[in-house]
Image (cartoon, rainbow, N blue to C red):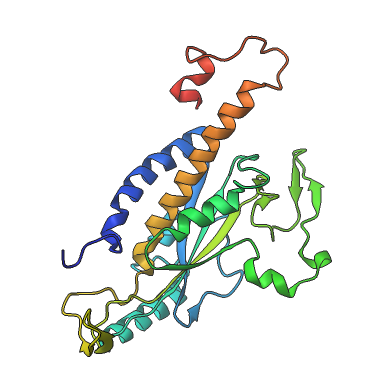
Amino acid sequence: MKGGGRSSARETIGRVASGAIAKKILKQFSGTEVLGYVSQVHQVVLPDGSVDHDTLTLDQIESNIVRCPNPEYAEKMIAAIDDVWARGDSIGGVVTCIVKNAPRGLGSPVFDKLEAELAKALMSLPATKGFECGSGFAGTFLTGSEHNDEFFTDEHGRIRTRTNRSGGIQGGISNGEIIKMRVAFKPTATIGKKQNTVTREKREIELTALTRHDPCVLPRAVPTVEAMVALVLVDQLMAQHAQCNLFPINPELQEPLSFNSPNLEPANI
């Protein structure tokens, strides 16, 4: 039907609904929070370091219609979208997503690496064309000594990394630091300008879309990115819980876990 189909953003309603449940599970289990925001619209790019991920809140992101936590750049993004809309065209951009208080040990060291699972999930969203984790492509400009995350023990006795160029994932497994990723979204394909195309009879014609279209999908894409990240993390959390509790490290836990075990009550999972 017109305006629908598998490539429509309407398809993501199921992802966002289930992702909302996944977010609640993560929040209850480990205080984990998934936050996405628009960091680029066309040529309007948030400078590195302009958003403090340690203090970033949902209220900051939702303070404007473009879902950019920096008010100055939010206005520039809105102006860019309004301008391209008036010309009947479209633009793309980037959604940055972070995970605070991510549990350590999620993922696998080879085929099911956490960043690989995240990449697969996020690249399944409509209009996605690129994925980065941590330093991403920018890391290719650094040497090993510059890029390596050095370990240290913080004031609470926890092993941490001084930098986070790995984006919270090392060797395919979460290390407890903030997980950071970026997803590139292409300009909307349906635009108000005439475009050349070819019919099924191989006849070259001009095509003009008569339906409404979004000049930029980025603000609407933020909840879908958050949902997919939350779903992957819950999936990995359940896998880790099942695997690690089969062979518990705690020597006091002698009997095998069963579905009647208090450790498997919903409040503990």
The image position of residue 107, as x and y in percent, is 61, 43
Does the image show residue 242? Answer: yes
Kindly indicate the quadrant of the structure image that contains residue 213. Answer: bottom left
Query: Relative to the observer, which residue lies in front, 195 or 183?
Result: 195
The image position of residue 12, as x and y in percent, is 32, 55
The image position of residue 68, as x and y in percent, is 43, 67
Badge count: 0
The image position of residue 48, as x and y in percent, is 60, 72
Q: Residue furthest right?
A: 145
Q: Residue furthest front?
A: 201
Does the image show residue 56? Answer: no
Placement of 81 over or under 179, stated as above or below: below
Placement of 135 over or under 161, stated as above or below: below
Asked if residue 258 lies left or right of residue 137, the reply is: left
The residue depicted at 74 percent of the width and 39 percent of the height is 156
The residue depicted at 30 percent of the width and 77 percent of the height is 215
Asked if residue 227 lies left or right of residue 98, the reply is: left
Kindly indicate the quadrant of the structure image that contains residue 30. Answer: top right
Q: Residue furthest top?
A: 255
Placement of 254 over or under 125, stated as above or below: above
The residue depicted at 34 percent of the width and 50 percent of the height is 16
Could you tell me which quadrant the N terminus lies in? bottom left
Query: Relative to the observer, which residue lies in front, 177 or 261?
Result: 261
Kindly indicate the quadrant of the structure image that contains residue 220. Answer: bottom left
The residue depicted at 39 percent of the width and 45 percent of the height is 19
